Amino acid sequence: MLIVDDEEPIRELLARWVQSLNLRPSIAANADEAVAALNAHHYDLAIIDIMMPGKNGLWLADELRRNHPDVAVVLSTGNAAMIDNTPPRIADLLIKPYKRERFVLAVDRGREWRRQAVEELERQAQLQAEVQSRVADIVDEVGRARRDGHDEFDVLWQIAVARIPEVVEHCERVERYTASIARELDVDQWSTDLFVRAARLHDIGKLAIPESVLTKPSPLTRGEVSIMRAHVEAGVAILSATSIVSATAPIVRASHEWFNGQGYPSGLAGTAIPLASRIISVADAYDAMTQDRRYRTRLDSVEAVSELLRGAPTQFDPDVVVAFLNIVNRH
C-alpha cells in the first residue's frame, strides 16, 4: 500500500495502521515521489492526500487512472468541501483528522474496489481476445468465399444479415442518409458510390463484438465501452483483407472521429477527417437518436436535429449538419 502525504507525522501514523493490518506500507512525500514508486513497484492501494505542494492529489489520482488503472485510490483531505470535487473513480474519501476505524473501512473499500477492477480488466482482456479471434474467422470465411468465386461484398453482407440484423437495419438507414447528404453537398457520383458503400459497412466490425456487450440491455461499463469501440478497428481489419471493398476501410476508421479532434481512434480533426466519414458521422448519430435503444427511448426528428446542431462544430462538421438540415426541412 502506498501512502502519499506531505506531512511526515501523518505518513508515519498511517504506515503503523497499515502494518497492524498485516499489509506492507510504502511512503511518498509528494506526487513526484509517488509516481516514481508506482513505476518501480506494484501497489494494490494508494492513500493520497489531496492538498500537497506542487502537483496535488487530484492530479496524482488522475495519473493512476490513466497509467495504473488497477490500483485503488483513497483520497484524503482536511477540507470536507472537497467531497463535491473528487473524481468519480475512487474507492473512498477520508476526512482528517483520521479515526482508525474509518481508516480500516477505507482500506477494506479499497481492496474490494481493486478486486472488482482486476476482474473487469481480466474480462476486458478475454473479450478483446474474442474480438481478435472473431475478426480472423470472418476474414478466413470471406477469403474462402472469394476463392470459390463469390462476391466479397455480398458474402460479407449476408454474414451480417444473419448475425447482426438490427445493426444491418441501422446501416441501411445510414446508407440512405449518406446518399442524400452527398447529393446535397454536390459530391461527384463516383465518390458518392464509395461513400454509400462505406456507410453500409461502417458498423461491419460489430460482427466481431461479443453478444454480451453488443446486446447488453443496460448501459455499458467503462471496459465494455472500450470493447465496443474496438468494432472500428475490427471493421477496418475485415475490410482491409478484401479486394473489392478495401477502399472503404479508411472511411470506416474515421467514422467516429470528432470535428474538434476528441473522437477515436486517431484523434483526427476538421478536414483531416475524410468527407465521407464526416457525413457518415452525422447520419449515424441521427439514426441512433431516432431509434429506440434497449436502455433509452428515441428522440423525435426535431429533437435529434437540435442535438446535431448542438454538436457542431465539436462533434460534427457544421457544413454537413446544415446540408442534412436542408434535407430534413424539405421532407
Image (cartoon, helix red, strand yellow):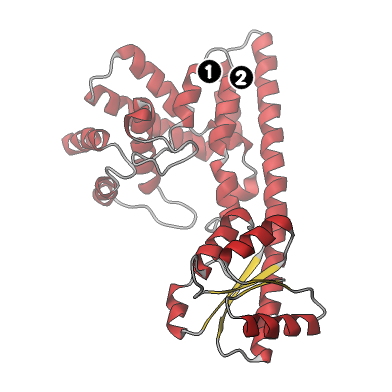
Going by the numbered disc 1, the residue's amino acid type is Ser
| Image spot of residue 1 (x, y percent) | 72, 71
**Label 2: which secondary element:** loop
Q: Is residue 275 visible?
A: yes
Going by the numbered disc 2, the residue's amino acid type is Ala
In the picture of the structure, the residue carrying the numbered disc 2 is 241
* Nearer to us in this view, 313 or 17: 17
Rendered view: 103 above or below 2: below
* Furthest-top residue in this view: 149
| Marking on residue 246 | 1
The picture quadrant where one finds residue 130 is top right
| Image spot of residue 53 (x, y percent) | 49, 71
Report the residue at 69% width, 86% height from top.
13
The picture quadrant where one finds residue 210 is top right
| Image spot of residue 269 (x, y percent) | 36, 36
Rendered view: 8 above or below 191: below
Side of 96 relative to 282 (left or right): right
* Nearer to us in this view, 264 or 232: 264
Report the residue at 56% width, 30% height from top.
235
Circles 1 and 2: CB distance less than 8 Å? Answer: yes
Rendered view: 302 above or below 204: below
Side of 238 relative to 195 (left or right): right
